Image: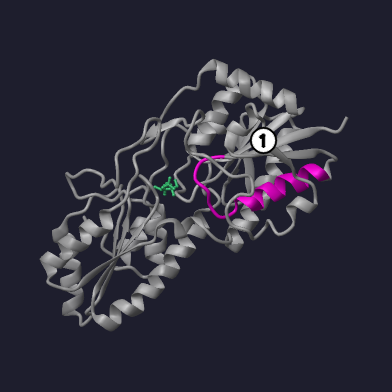
Amino acid sequence: MKKKIGIVTGGGDCPGLNAVIRAVAKAAAHRGWETLGILGGYAGLLEPRQYRVLDYQALSGLLTRGGTILGTANRGKFSAKTGHGEGRRLPKELLDDTRAGMDALGLSALVSVGGDGSLSIALQMHEHGIPIVGVPKTIDNDLHGTLMTFGFDSAVACATDALDRLHTTAESHQRVMVLEVMGRYAGWIALYAGVAGGADVILIPEIPFTYDSICAKVKEREAQGKHFTLVVAAEGAREKGGGFVTSGAAEANREAHLGGIGAVVTAELTKRTGKETRNCVLGHLQRGGSPTTFDRALCSMFGATAVELVAAGEFGRMPAFTGAGVVGVPISEAVGRLKTVPPEGNLARTARALGISLGD
Ligand code: F6P
C-alpha cells in the first residue's frame, strides 16, 4: 500500500503556507507517497475528520498564493499558548484521539506547520509517540532553533513598502508619521523594516522607550532642516516602566491581543512636539498576499527537508535555516521561550550607527 502522510497548518496564517504545502506534497509524491491535507488545524484529525487529498491538480498555483488552502486555527481544543511564551499541556485523551485520527486516515506521519503554539503542541504529540515533524512558521520570527521562520521576510517587505509610502507623504506635509507593525513580544519586523525603510525612530519591546528620547530625535531633525520624522513602533513596544498596550482582554487559552501603541505614541508626540502626527496601523496586511522570493525558496527548502526527516524517521524535529542552508533540529530547541531581538546585536547596533533612535 502507498505510504500516506498528513500535513496540517496551525496558528496565525502568513505568506508561504501554501508554498510549504506544495513542497511537502511534491517531495512526498516524488517518493511515491500520498499526502492528505488536514483541514482547519489539528482539529481536522478528530471526528468528523476533515481532509483533502493533495494530488498534483490540488497543487497548481500554490507557490505564490497567500493564506492556507487547508485553513488554520489559533483557538479551540488545540490552543496551547496562554501568553508571553507560557504553554498549556494538552490532555492525554486529546493526544490519544489525535493518534486515533491518524490511524483512521492511514497516516504514517504528520507534518505540522506552525509557530510557537502549534510547534509546542507538535512536541507534546511527539512525546506522546505520534510520528510528527514540524515546519517553523511565523511573521514574528520569534522562534529559536532557526535563524528565520518563513513568512517573516514577506511581512518585513510589506512593512518596508509601507514606510516607503509614508516617507513621501510625511515629507510633503512636514509631519511625524507613526507606523505600528506586528511582531508580538519581539521587535524583529519593526527593526528590520525600520532599517530597510529608513525610519528615524524604531521602538521595539526589547528596548523600552522614553518620550523625551523620541522628541529629542524629532527636534534634532527639525534643527537639521528635516521637518518630518518616521517612527516605527512594534505592537509590543512600551514606555520605560510601562506595560504592553493591548486592544482587548485575552480569551481563555489565548495570547493577549497586542495593539494600539501607535495611537498612544501619536497622541503623546502631538502633545509634546506640537507637530502634526499621524498614525498608521499596518495590521493583517503583513500576513496576506504572495510570499517574497526569499520566502518561496525557504518554504520549498523547508517542505523538502520535512519530507526527508519523515523518510529518515527523524520525528520530533523540524527544518531550520542556519544562514548557510537548511538542517533538521529538535522542535524542543525552538519552542517554550521566545527569540527576541538582542539589544546589543548586529541590527540594533547598525541602527544606532546610522543615527536611528531606538527610543532609549
Ligand atoms: O503571531 C503572528 C501575529 O500576526 C502577531 O504578530 C500578532 O500579534 C497576532 O498574530 C495577531 O493575531 P490575530 O490574527 O489573532 O489578531
Q: Is residue 288 magenta?
A: no
In the picture provided, is 144 more to the left or to the right than 265?
right
Residue 23 in the figure: left or right of residue 289? right
Classify mark 1: helix, strand or loop. loop
User: Relative to the observer, which residue lies in front, 152 or 319?
Assistant: 152
Is 12 within the magenta?
A: yes
Considering only vertical position in the picture, is 180 above or below 77?
below
Residue 180 lies left or right of residue 104; in this view the side is left
Residue most toward the right? 1
- Determine the image quadrant of residue 283: bottom left
| Mark 1 residue crowding within 10 angstroms, few (<14) / some (14–19) / many (20+) | some
Identify the magenta region. Answer: 10-29
Q: Main secondary structure of the magenta part?
A: helix
Residue at x 77% of width, y 27% of height = 106
Vertical placement of residue 20 versus 271, above or below = above
Does the beta carbon of the residue at mark 1 sit less than 8 Å from ligand 1?
no
Q: Which residue is mark 1?
A: 50
Spot occupied by residue 264 in the image (x, y as percentages of width and height) = 21, 56
Q: How many marks?
A: 1
Q: Nearer the viewer, residue 303 or 63?
A: 63
Q: Amino acid at mark 1?
A: Gln
